[in-house]
Image (cartoon, rainbow, N blue to C red):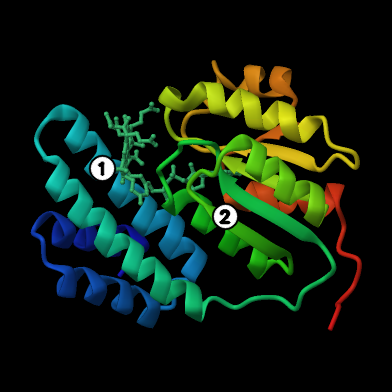
Amino acid sequence: MSVHDHREGFLAALLARDSARARGCVESALEDGVPIPDIYLEMLEPALREVGHRWAMGTLNVAEEHYATAVAQSILDGLSRQLKRAPKDGRLAVVTGTPEELHALGLRIVADFLEADGWEVLQLGPGAPAHDIARLVESEQPDVVALSTATAGVLDGVVEVIRALAALDPRPCIVAGGQFWTAQTSPSALDFGADLVLQDPRELVATLHQRIPPLGVVE
Ligand code: B12
């Protein structure tokens, strides 16, 4: 069975509100040898995108969307525990939603991709206040801060946090990502002070590997 078939089965199970069947689809994908990162990006993410689309079209209500998200979140928790992580290599990342951002799954996936590549990751969840994020970054001095933004409604906080981080000394590499950043909006992230705007967690890992090479395995 291809990952496409697993994805279709997973989405159908979510829409039928059958969490056992949804879990079964993920398990059978694992049995078929689909790597966990592919399950994240080619099963969970597209299924949630479709859920969001149906919500936006009015064919699925908020309770149904919450149900699908809760199931996806719990599956993500299980997969995350099974994900192979490279030994820590001396690089530190902070991964956080921008202020007032409530979407949590994307940044969670980003954090897992970084950890799988050897990063130590401080994951702050959906969206602490800008000032508090900046204070934590100031004290931890990570190499990179990955910021996740899904919705336009929280733009003030996006500007505030990017500016606060860009003013720090030492200044971390600031990466903006998430669905809010499109071809139209991405240039403004760079204007606010971000170093990179990326969407694909794989591209993030590869780009950072070049910009901030691993120091070597640390115990
Ligand atoms: C679940 C959900 C919610 C839940 C979130 C619960 C939770 N615990 O996460 C709740 C109910 C809270 C919610 C609220 C809202 N939501 Co909502 N939501 C969704 C939904 C259905 C799924 C989100 C999700 O988890 N996707 C799966 C993850 C894995 O994908 P992702 O977040 O895009 O992350 C991937 C990439 O973007 C990338 N990425 C993400 N961050 C970063 C960071 C870096 C550095 C990098 C490199 C990559 C990266 O990597 C991830 C893996 O590939 C989406 C639909 C969709 N298209 O995703 C709508 C969606 C995001 N929501 C939307 C909206 C409008 C809202 C609300 C404004 C609704 C309202 N009127 O209240 C509020 C805003 C709340 C807020 N302040 O944040 C719109 C956003 C449109 C826009 N761009 O402005 C969407 C697209 C729905 C739609 N089709 O209209 N939502």
Figure quadrant of the N terminus: bottom left
Front tag of 1 and 2: 2
Position of 151 with respect to 192 (left or right) is left
**Within-10-Å neighbours for mark 1: few <14, some 14–19, many 20+:** few
Are the two marked residues, 1 and 2, in contact with CB atoms closer than 8 angstroms? Answer: no
- x and y percentages locating residue 115 in the rendered image: 65, 67
SS type, badge 2: strand
Q: Secondary structure at mark 1?
A: helix
Question: Viewer-proximal residue, 9 or 217?
Answer: 217
**In x, y percent, where is residue 176?**
63, 35
Give the alpha-carbon distance from disc 1 to disc 2, as whole Å.
27 Å
Of the numbered discs 1 and 2, the one sitting upstream in the chain is: 1
Query: Cβ of disc 1 within 8 Å of ligand 1?
Result: no
Q: What residue would you read off at disc 1?
A: 50
Q: Which residue is mark 2?
A: 124
Q: Of the residues shown, which amino acid type is indicated by label 2?
A: Leu
Q: Which quarter is ligand 1 in?
A: top left
Residue depicted at 25% across the width and 42% down the height: 50
Residue at 54% over, 44% down? 128
Image quarter in which the C terminus is found: bottom right
Residue drawn at x 86%, y 39% is: 171
At horizontal 35% and vertical 58% (from top left) the residue drawn is: 43
| Residue 186 visible here | yes
* For residue 204, above or below residue 86: above
